[in-house]
Image (cartoon, rainbow, N blue to C red):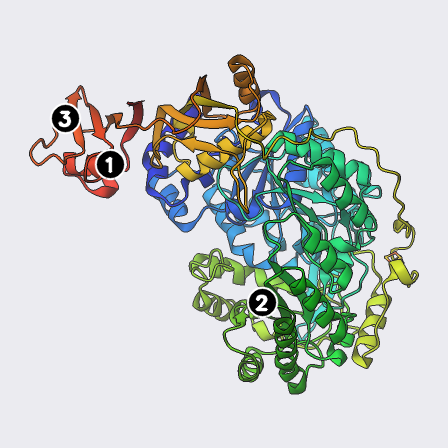
């Protein structure tokens, strides 16, 4: 415990003041779970090899966190890839990477479980391992290290990173995670060594232990066989499927971040799987069969999540949300139950049809001014090849009806380099965009214009196009030039060509790519999908040093009888089906949606229930209505403490946290008028990042007179750790209290004297005693009121040095 306190102290004084976005690394969020390591049998560190704001947006990550922490014998904590400035600081100070909940070094966990969301996060996996002091290669890790596990979409072809992992899970984790934890716990109790433990875990359905399989290659470099060297390990690893999605765990009390993350809202997974059969889409294959959650279950989950988080935005997520059979009923009931709650709903991934547009237009969503569609190809011929069963007429009707109902922007997604693509197909993208643009302009003068987002086709494993060659970068460049001549350049947005080429290599790669990843990492590759950090040179040198030709993996067409590196991982969809789809694609023949047009025997067989019914809706957990949009009758002033723990949380982040506290409190909040109404809340003067305070104030107005004691209790019911409400009093309606002065207490090692000559006008009082500076700032005077800038002037020290000071706001006068 003492070690953790010291560690945290060092982080707070030597590391976090000097890096960007320190909120990423402090934890202390609402609903985060901290358990006692000493009293818990199995300790899991869930690792997301991306930034906090990316990783915290993934539903699967939240699901595992909830399931593991619900067990009495286990705990789950979180770690994310640190941004290079944090990495450098940790290295400089000799500090290890740690968990956000208890600041425990990553190497002290039993399991380090990575989410493999995307191939271009592979170097970040190595970064997390290295900063944790864990050897990169599985074979170099003994029983004393955590077991390194991978799961998520990229685990369907884990071979490029197989050397770094002890095991992978193919498929859905809700049930499998408990099987894995039970087995590891039993193995630990029995005192198993790593190899024995892995042999036991390998018996669990869905688990792949790469060390038990050895690849052999033909002279032409293709895979000859994957030899099983442990007879107990399965020949084929079958993916895990949760049969009854409605009974599967839903995270109704997810961690609520202080910082703004990519998906800062409640995400309700309404359905899993998609049977539309787009031939380029790996998720459409690997997430089969399609399963829906019940409307009742979803509404109850939403009501719970709303109370537990205070998020007033909800995303109904799935691969194709408007395909959810109860979508109308769900939206109608959501609107009815949350009427007056200022809740906005978003529906990602719209289908291209009038029905979806009608739904999107009817949503109470803040983002509804843009309509997004993905026709993917410019001609009907090519859309038939990829089985994107949508016509030009569908697209024009959907776009014009969207624009007529108030959507001002249209965003269209296209792919270049699709199989069988010709120059005529590329040129047709331009023609289609122009048609959409002029049709939208005809129906509305308010139409602002098109965005045309272009990405590059990457053949993915487990899809009908897995045998196809990816276009070379040179060929794609030529097509890009051709498209540029045919589309208004102001509309165009491009994905990175170099990144797509690299993604293509790792998507269908094998174990010979592990050295490439390791060398690229050593040469500085990190956060490869971040434009500003991508280092193509590190990668080209890595391929060269490792003696690997990237084009062997990307732009080589595979024979259909070639053994592919992922064939031992079964998605449930048969090779025969994929082959049949591939042949149909080349002939331009489409395949219908098996859900609406009958089963086409994709191979799932018994695993697919093929039918989905919806019960009558009866919701118990709805929330009260009519809290908002009424005149204020009472105003309250709250004094709170921003403790040291959360001193790196910015003013804006605190502001949002307070708004969520108010929503969670269920108090009848008065709202502002206007297009985007929000609760009437006012705050005391902004506190800089890195400063704690015992005297912060916020005020809010209510539409009902609630006694002070009652209001205080409701506010205190669910606070994020680190934010302490000290008092609440009624205030007069009208102008907020204005503050004239702020008093700070500052501790800075080594500072015993200050410069009293040329003190800025804003410094009203300055004392120094026993290394503590007491500073009173006049907030109304001319000049800077920033405490760190003043500190610089007072001490004559560098801006970087004063950042390390411990500053507390003691009073607002
Ligand atoms: S088994 Fe039939 S209904 Fe089920 S996903 Fe496959 S093709 Fe569709």
Q: Which residue is mark 1?
A: 785
User: Looking at the image, which residue is at 78% across and 71% down?
Assistant: 387
Sooner in the amino-acid sequence: mark 1 or mark 3: 3
The image quarter in which residue 510 lies = bottom right
Point out which mark residue 752 bears.
Answer: 3
Nearest to viewer (mark 2 / mark 1): 2
Residue 464, image x, y percentages? 77, 69
Q: Find ligand 1 in the image and state its quadrant.
A: bottom right
Compared to residue 678, the image places residue 596 above or below, namely: below
Nearest to viewer (mark 1 / mark 3): 1
- For the residue with label 1, is its CB less than 8 Å from the closest atom of ligand 1? no
Q: Nearer the viewer, residue 197 or 365?
A: 365
Compared to residue 270, the image places residue 492 above or below, namely: below
CA gap between label 3 and label 2 equals 64 Å
Point out which mark residue 447 bears.
Answer: 2
Residue 485, image x, y percentages? 54, 84
SS category of the residue bearing label 1: loop
User: Mark 3 and 2 residues: CB-CB less than 8 Å, in contact?
Assistant: no
User: Looking at the image, which residue is at 79% across and 49% down?
Assistant: 327
User: Looking at the image, which residue is at 62% across and 47% down?
Assistant: 115
Residue 525, image x, y percentages? 46, 59
């Amino acid at each position: 415990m003492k070690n953790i306190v010291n560690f945290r102290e060092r982080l707070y004084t030597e590391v976090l003041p000097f890096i960007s976005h320190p909120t990423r690394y402090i934890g202390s969020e609402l609903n985060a779970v901290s358990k006692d390591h000493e009293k818990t049998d199995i300790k899991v560190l869930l690792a997301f090899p991306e930034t906090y704001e990316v990783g915290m947006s993934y539903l699967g990550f939240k699901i595992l966190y909830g399931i593991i922490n619900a067990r009495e014998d286990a705990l789950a904590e979180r770690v994310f890839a640190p941004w290079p400035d944090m990495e450098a600081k940790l290295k400089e100070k000799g500090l290890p990477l740690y968990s956000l909940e208890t600041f425990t070094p990553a190497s002290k966990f039993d399991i380090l479980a990575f989410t493999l969301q995307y191939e271009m996060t592979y170097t970040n996996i190595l970064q997390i391992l290295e900063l944790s002091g864990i050897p990169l290669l599985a074979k170099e890790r003994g029983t004393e290290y955590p077991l390194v596990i991978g799961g998520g979409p990229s685990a369907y072809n884990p071979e490029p990173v197989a050397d770094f992992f002890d095991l992978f899970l193919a498929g859905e984790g809700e049930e499998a995670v408990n099987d894995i934890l039970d087995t590891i716990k039993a193995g630990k109790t029995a005192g198993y060594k790593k190899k024995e433990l892995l042999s036991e875990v390998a018996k669990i359905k869905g688990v792949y232990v790469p060390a038990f399989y050895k690849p052999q290659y033909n002279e032409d470099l293709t895979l000859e066989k994957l030899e099983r060297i442990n007879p107990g390990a399965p020949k084929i690893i079958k993916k895990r499927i949760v049969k009854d999605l409605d009974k599967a765990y839903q995270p109704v009390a997810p961690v609520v971040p202080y910082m703004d993350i990519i998906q800062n809202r409640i995400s309700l997974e309404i359905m899993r799987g998609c049977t539309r059969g787009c031939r380029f889409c790996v998720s459409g294959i690997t997430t089969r069969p399609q399963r829906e959650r019940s409307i009742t279950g979803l509404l109850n989950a939403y009501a719970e999540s709303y109370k537990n988080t205070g998020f007033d935005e909800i995303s109904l997520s799935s691969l194709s949300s408007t395909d959810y059979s109860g979508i109308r009923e769900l939206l109608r009931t959501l609107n009815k139950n949350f009427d007056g709650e200022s809740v906005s709903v978003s529906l990602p991934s719209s289908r291209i049809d009038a029905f979806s547009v009608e739904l999107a237009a009817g949503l109470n969503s803040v983002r509804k001014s843009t309509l997004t569609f993905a026709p993917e190809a410019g001609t009907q011929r090519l859309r038939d090849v990829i089985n994107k069963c949508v016509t030009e007429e569908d697209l024009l009707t959907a776009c014009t009806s969207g624009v007529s109902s108030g959507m001002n922007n249209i965003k269209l997604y296209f792919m270049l380099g699709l199989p069988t693509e010709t120059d005529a197909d590329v040129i047709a993208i331009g023609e289609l965009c122009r048609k959409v643009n002029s049709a939208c302009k005809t129906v509305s003068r308010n139409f602002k214009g098109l965005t045309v987002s272009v990405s590059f086709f990457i053949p993915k494993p487990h899809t009908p196009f897995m045998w196809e060659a990816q276009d070379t970068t040179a060929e794609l460049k030529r097509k890009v030039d051709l498209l540029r001549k045919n589309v208004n350049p102001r509309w165009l947005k491009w994905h990175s060509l170099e990144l797509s080429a690299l993604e293509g290599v790792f998507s269908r790669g094998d174990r010979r790519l592990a050295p490439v990843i390791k060398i690229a990492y050593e040469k500085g590759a990190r956060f490869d999908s971040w434009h500003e950090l991508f280092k193509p040179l590190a990668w080209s040198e890595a391929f060269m040093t490792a003696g690997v030709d990237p084009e062997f993996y990307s732009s080589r067409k595979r024979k259909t009888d070639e053994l592919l590196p992922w064939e031992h991982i079964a998605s449930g969809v048969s090779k025969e089906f994929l082959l049949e789809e591939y042949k149909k694609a080349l002939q331009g023949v489409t395949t219908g949606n098996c859900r609406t047009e009958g089963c086409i025997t994709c191979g799932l067989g018994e695993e697919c229930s093929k039918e989905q019914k919806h019960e009558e809706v009866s919701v118990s957990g709805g929330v009260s209505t009519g809290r908002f949009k009424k005149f204020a009758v009472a105003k309250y002033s709250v004094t709170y403490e921003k403790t040291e723990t959360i001193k790196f949380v910015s003013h804006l982040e605190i502001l949002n946290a307070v708004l969520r506290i108010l929503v969670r409190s269920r108090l009848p909040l008065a709202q502002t008028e206007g297009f985007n109404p929000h609760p009437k809340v006012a705050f005391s003067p902004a506190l800089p990042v890195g400063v704690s305070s015992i005297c912060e104030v916020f005020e809010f107005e209510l539409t009902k007179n609630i006694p002070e004691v009652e209001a205080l209790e409701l506010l205190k019911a669910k606070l994020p750790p680190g934010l302490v409400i000290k008092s609440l009093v009624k205030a007069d309606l009208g102008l907020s209290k204005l503050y004239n002065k702020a008093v700070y207490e500052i501790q800075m090692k080594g500072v015993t004297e200050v410069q009293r000559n040329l003190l800025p006008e804003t410094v009203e009082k300055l004392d120094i005693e026993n290394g503590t500076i007491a500073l009173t700032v006049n907030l109304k005077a001319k000049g800077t009121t920033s405490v760190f800038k003043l500190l610089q002037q007072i001490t004559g020290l560098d801006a970087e040095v004063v950042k390390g000071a411990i500053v507390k706001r003691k009073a607002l006068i």
